[in-house]
Image (tube, rainbow, N blue to C red):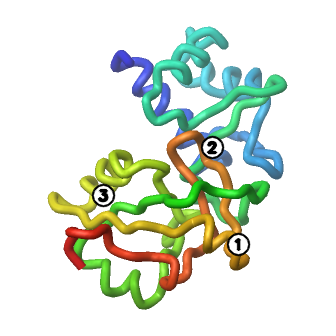
C-alpha cells in the first residue's frame, strides 16, 4: 500500500475507531457510517479534498490488516475501537485455538486475571501464531505467545466475536483457558 493510502487508513481508523465526534460522524450500533458521509467529512479536510469511493475501496483492498469493510453503502471498522459504549457484535463459534502475543512482563498478571480489553472495547486474539507474534512484537522484542483454548472456552460460556479473518474478539478470556505456548517464556 502506498504512503497516501496508508495515511488514509490511519485517518479512517481515527474517525471510525477512536474519535468519530471529531469528524462529526455518528456511528450506528454496529459502528458503521454511510460511505458518502465519511467521504464528505474527510473531503472538508484539505488533505483529502480528492477522496472518492474508489480511493477508499483501494485503501481497504490493499490493507494487510483488513480493518474495514463496506457493506450496504456503509463502512465500519472490524475491531480496535476505543470508543465509550460498546458496539454490538454477534457471538460466533471460534476455532479450537486462538493466540495472543504479549510482553513477558505481563504474563504473570494475565495468567492470574485473564485477558482483559484494557483501553479497547474487546480483547484482541489472533487466528494464527504469526499474527500473534507480530502483535506481541509491538509490545516486546521477545514476546510470549499465549494459546487460547477458544472452542472449549466458548462451550463453557465465554462469548467470542469475529473481528476479521485474522482477528477474533472477546469481552474477557478467563485464565483457565490460557497457556503460554510450549517452549515460550512464562
Image disc number at residue 136: 3
Measured in 3D between alpha carbons, the distance from the residue under mark 3 to the one under mark 2, in whole angstroms, is 20 Å
Please identify the quadrant where the C terminus is shown.
bottom left
At x 70%, y 57%, the residue is 93
- Tell us which disc is closer to us: 1 or 3: 1
Going 71% across and 40% down the picture, which residue do you hit? 24
Q: Measuring 81% from the left and 23% from the top, which residue is drawn there?
A: 73
User: Residue at coordinates 55% horizontally, 82% vertically from top-left?
Assistant: 174
Task: Name the residue that disc number 2 marks.
Answer: 78
Q: Position of residue 131 (x, y in %)?
A: 38, 46
**Quarter of image, res 142:** bottom left
Nearer to us in this view, 80 or 172: 172
Q: Can residue 46 be seen in this view?
A: no
Image-quadrant location for residue 137: bottom left
Is 182 on the left or on the right of 94, as rendered? left
Q: Mark 1 points at which residue?
A: 155
Amino acid at each position: 500500500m502506498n504512503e497516501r493510502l496508508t495515511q488514509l487508513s490511519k485517518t479512517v481508523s481515527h474517525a471510525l475507531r477512536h474519535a468519530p465526534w471529531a469528524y462529526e460522524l455518528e456511528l450506528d450500533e454496529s459502528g458503521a457510517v454511510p460511505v458518502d458521509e465519511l467521504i464528505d467529512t474527510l473531503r472538508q479536510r484539505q488533505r483529502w479534498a480528492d477522496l472518492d469511493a474508489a480511493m477508499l475501496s483501494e485503501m481497504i483492498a490493499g490493507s494487510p490488516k483488513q480493518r474495514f469493510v463496506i457493506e450496504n453503502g456503509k463502512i465500519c471498522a472490524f475491531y480496535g475501537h476505543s470508543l465509550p459504549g460498546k458496539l454490538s457484535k454477534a457471538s460466533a463459534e471460534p476455532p479450537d485455538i486462538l493466540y495472543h502475543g504479549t510482553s513477558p512482563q505481563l504474563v504473570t498478571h494475565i495468567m492470574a486475571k485473564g485477558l482483559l480489553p484494557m483501553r479497547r472495547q474487546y480483547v484482541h486474539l489472533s487466528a494464527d501464531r504469526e499474527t500473534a507474534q507480530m502483535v506481541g512484537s509491538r509490545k516486546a522484542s521477545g514476546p510470549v505467545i499465549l494459546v487460547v483454548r477458544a472452542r472449549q472456552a466458548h462451550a463453557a460460556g465465554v462469548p467470542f466475536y469475529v473481528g476479521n479473518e485474522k482477528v477474533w474478539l472477546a469481552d474477557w478470556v478467563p485464565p483457565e483457558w490460557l497457556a503460554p505456548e510450549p517452549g515460550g517464556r512464562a
